[in-house]
Image (cartoon, grey):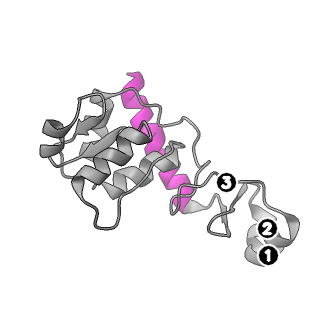
Amino acid sequence: MLVRLGKWLRAAGYDTVLIEKEMPDNKILEQAVCEKRLLLTRDIHFTKMAAQETVIYLKSNSVQACAQELMGKCTLNWLYRPFSRCLVCNALFVEPEENTFLEQVPPKVRLTVKNFWYCPQCKKMYWEGTHTKRMRTQLERWQKIISA
């Protein structure tokens, strides 16, 4: 269910749960309600199961189109807290410890990069490289659409 859009929401800094394993629809909805989350879905039957303030139905097929459709349905700030969460597990990044930093970051990267993030759940280091810069540019584009 919109896993790629969910990862973009994580990149923006939003606490985003992704349902990636098989789970009954009623359990998915129950989890969303219990955790006071919005449920983004492309399955229209969810709209018949719950109140509109819980379920946001998206018709679009591409990530770009889904992002734009979502912007029209709820208030978003794509620059909310960029790169503050792990895209893999959703944990908040923490300041890396020196020994973790030295073990996981290539020497060349240590010399050229200033911003590093550590995921306490995945136990991995992340830094702002070309991939992150491309993602930041996309988040900025989406934010400009909202601001226009």
Q: In terms of secondary structure, where does tag 3 sit?
A: loop
Task: Specify the label residue 131 is tagged with.
Answer: none
Total labels drawn: 3
In this view of the protein, can residue 26 be seen by the observer? yes
Q: Is residue 69 left or right of residue 78?
A: left
What is the number of the mark on residue 107? 1
User: Which amino acid, mark 3?
Assistant: Phe
Q: Is residue 119 above or below residue 133?
A: below
Viewer-closest of 114 and 126: 126
> Can residue 139 be found in the magenta stretch?
yes
**Residue occupying the point 57% across, 44% down:** 82
Which residue position is annotated with label 3? 93
Q: Secondary structure at mark 1?
A: helix
Mark 3 burial class by Cα count in 10 Å: few <14, some 14-19, many 20+: some
| Spatial CA span between label 2 and label 1 | 5 Å
Question: Which marked residue is nearer to the observer: mark 1 or mark 3?
Answer: 3
Viewer-closest of 118 and 142: 118
Label 2 or label 3, whichever lies nearer to me, is 3
Prevailing secondary structure class for the magenta stretch in the rendered image: helix
Please give left or right for residue 130 compared with residue 71 in the image: right
Identify residue type, mark 1.
Pro
Question: x%, y% of residue 99?
Answer: 86, 72
Outermost residue, right side: 98
Residue named by callout 2:
110
Q: Amino acid at mark 2?
A: Arg
Would you say the residues marked 2 and 1 are in contact, meaning their CB atoms lie under 8 Å apart?
Answer: yes
Q: Nearer the viewer, residue 140 or 31?
A: 31
Which quadrant does the N terminus fall into? bottom left
Span highlighted in magenta in the image: 131-148
